[in-house]
Image: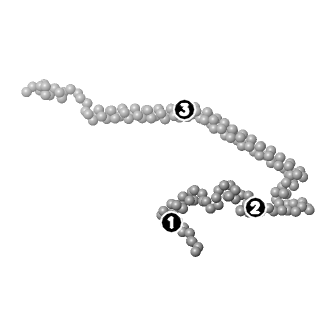
Amino acid sequence: MNKRSSRYRRYATYRPRRRTVRLRRFLRTSLMLLAIGFGIFIGWHVVNKIAKPYIVGYCEGREIAQIKAEIAQEKRDNRSLNREIRYLGTEAGQTAEARKLGMVKEGEVALIVETSEQDPSHTREESGVEKDKKPFWQAAGAWVAGLFGGGKKEATAE
């Protein structure tokens, strides 16, 4: 047989091995991903460096506005307290504060008015509600409790 037969010719041409091709592809892809990651990293730091003064300025502006609002509120409170101090320095202010504390002037008689729970002017009959009628939610609760046998049983007097 001839050494140059078709059978031997296909091995004579150079073919890179599959392992070498895969390795090159892997290295090329890895290098590309590494370059992209490095580019993103550098880009992020550049943008951060550029934007930082604006971010700091924005935050400081918000803080300044908040502090100004607090100062304005404290000034309003201060004015109110100064007005109260001036009022309590007068005879009328001292009298009003003393009466709040339950004090009376010489010669006055202190009356204490107690209100009872059963004030006749505030009964249910006058407001149009019957005395023995329960609110709907209590009646419904008693009905449900009665269905399941968990309600209180009223004692009947004979």
Query: Residue 131, percent across and down?
Result: 65, 60
Q: Amino acid at mark 1?
A: Gly
Q: Are marks 2 and 1 in contact (CB under 8 Å)?
A: no
User: Distance from label 2 to label 1 (Cα)?
Assistant: 38 Å
N-terminal-most mark, 3 or 1: 3
Quick check: 33 left or right of 5? Answer: right
Q: Are marks 3 and 2 in contact (CB under 8 Å)?
A: no
Quadrant location of the N terminus in the rendered image: top left
The chosen color scheme is: one colour
Identify the residue at image location x=66%, y=55%. 128
Identify the residue at image location x=54%, y=58%. 140
N-terminal-most mark, 3 or 2: 3
From this viewpoint, which residue is outermost toward the left?
1
Tag 2 secondary structure? loop
Q: Nearer the viewer, residue 118 or 88?
A: 118
Q: Pointer 1: residues within 10 angstroms few (<14), some, or many (20+)?
A: few
User: Distance from label 3 to label 2 (Cα)?
Assistant: 73 Å
Q: Amino acid at mark 2?
A: Thr
Q: Which mark is residue 134?
A: none
Whether 126 is drawn above or below 9: the answer is: below
Q: Pointer 3: residues within 10 angstroms few (<14), some, or many (20+)?
A: few
Quick check: 80 left or right of 117? Answer: right
The quarter of the picture where residue 60 lies is top right
Q: Nearer the viewer, residue 157 or 43?
A: 157
From this viewpoint, which residue is outermost toward the right?
107
Q: Which residue is mark 2?
A: 115
Q: Which residue is mark 1?
A: 150
Q: Amino acid at mark 3?
A: Val
